[in-house]
Amino acid sequence: MKKFFSVFMVMMLVIGVLAACGPKRDAEQVKEKNSGTATENVKKPEKLVVWVNDEEKQKQALSDIFKKYTEKTGIKIEMVAVSMLDQAKKLALDGPAGKGPDVFYQPHDRIGDIVLQGLADPVDLGDVKGEYSKTAIDAVTYDGDIYGAPLVVETYGLFYNKDLVPQAPKTMDELMNIAKEKTNASQDKYGFLMEATNFYFIYPFFAGYGGYVFHNEDGKYDTNDVGLANDGAVKGAQLVQSWFKNGYIPKEITGDVMNGLFTKGNVAAVITGPWNIATYRDALGDKLATAPLPVLENGEHPKSFVGVKSWMLSAYSKNKEWATDFMKFITNEENSLHYYEVAGEMPANEKALTNEKITNDPLISGFAEQIQYGEPMPNVPQMSQVWDPMGNALQFIAKGDDPKAVLTEAVKTIQDKIAASGGK
C-alpha cells in the first residue's frame, strides 16, 4: 500500500508539473508567434506620424516614397520636419503628451542614450533582417536587440585630384611619397591633407594597428576596457604626429581650410566623407576621383568609423505593427535606391548598396568599398565621454608631445568622465 501511494504521489506530481508547464508553454508559443511585425488582423491606422530630418533633398526623396506607401496601404503619412539632432529631446517632451511620432530618424551612435531614456522600442525586422548590410545591423543593435531599420550608411575615404595624382595611392607609403613631393607650405600647396586633430577622422589609423575605443565582444561593449592607449593606438598616433613633424599638414588645419585648398586645386589628396562630393565635383569636375583609405604598412586596411542612420520606433506609438511595416518598406531595395538617387546618401540595404547604379558611380564606389573595412561607431552613451579627451590629445600630439603619455592621460580622463556620469 505504501509503495502504491508513493507511485501515485509521483504520478500526481508529474501531472501537476505538466499542467503547470503546458499552458505556459502554449502561451509562450502564442506570444512568440504574435511577436512579429505582421500586420494581419491588426487594424490599419488612418495615418502614421513620421519625423524626418529637416534637409530638402532628403525630404524630397522621402515624400516620393511615402506617397507610394499610402498608395499601397491607404495609410496617410504625416511628414514632420525636425532636425535629426533635436528629435530625441523633442520626443522626450512630446511623446508622453501624445504628440510625438510613430517613427523618427536618428544616427546610430545615439541609440544607447535613446534606449536608456525609454524613448524607443526594439524593431522586429523579421525575414528582411538579412537584406541589410551586417555593419548596418551591428550598428543598430544595442544590448542584443535591434532598434532601427537602417536607411543610410556612411564613412570616409580618399578624394584625389587626377591632374595631380593620376592613380589613387594604394598604401600609406605611396600617400606619404605624394605628401613629400607635392607639399610646399609657403605656396599653400599640399600632397595630402585631412583634419588630423579630429578623432572621428583619425580613428582608422589607431584601429588599423590594433587600437579600439571600447572592447567589443559579440556586439556588446565593455566600456571599462578602453583601448586608446595600447601599443596599436600609440603606433597610430606616432604616424599622425609624423605628418605634422614633416610639415605635410599644418597644425591649424580645419575642415574649411582643407576644403578651400582642395577645391582650388592646391591639394593632391584629402581624407573626408561623401557629404563633400557635390562641392568637390562642382569645383574639379572630371578631375575628381575617390578611393578607399590606403593600406597601412602592416598590410591592414584602416578601420574607419561607419555611421548608420536609421528609422526608429517610438515607444509611445500606438501603431507599432504598421509603423514597423512602414520602416521596412522605406528601406527596401527599390526605395533605398530612390533615396540614394535623390538625396545622394549610400543605402544600408545590401542589394541596393551593391547595385550597379552605385558600383558604377566612380565617386561613390570608393566609399562603398571602404565600408567593408570599417566598423560601426560605438552606440553606447559612454561614447560621448570620448570625443573631448581624444580631441585634446591629438592637439598635444600635433605639437610634438609624447604620444604614449598623452594617450594614457586621455584614457584616464575618459574613464574618470564615464565614472562621474554614472556609466560603467
Image (spheres, helix red, strand yellow):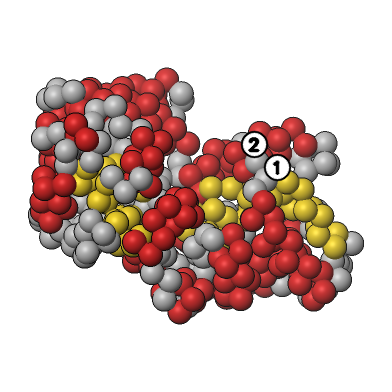
At 12% from the left and 56% from the top, the residue drawn is 174
Vertical arrangement, residue 261 with respect to residue 20, above or below: above
> Circles 1 and 2: CB distance less than 8 Å?
yes
Q: Is residue 70 left or right of residue 37?
A: right
Q: In the orientation shown, which residue stands out farthest toward the front? A: 187
Asked whether residue 102 is in view, the answer is no
Count residues near mark 2 (Cα–Cα under 10 Å), then give few for <14, some for 14-19, many for 20+: few
Residue type for callout 2:
Asp
Residue 383 on image: x %, y %: 41, 36
- Residue 248 seen in this snapshot: yes
Residue lying at 59% horizontally and 59% vertically, measured from the top left = 343
Depth order, front residue of 161/274: 161
Res. 77 image quadrant:
bottom right
- Tell me residue 234's x, y (percent): 15, 37
Q: Is residue 354 left or right of residue 10?
A: left
Instruction: Check disc 2 and report the residue beneath it.
Output: 86
**Extreme residue toward the bottom, this view:** 356
Q: Secondary structure at mark 2?
A: helix
**From the viewer's perspective, is 238 left or right of 219?**
left
Residue in the foreground of this view, choosing between 113 and 107:
107
Q: Residue at x 28, y 45 (%)?
A: 266
Residue of label 1: 82
Q: Is residue 183 rendered to the left or right of residue 21?
A: left
- Give SS at disc 1: loop
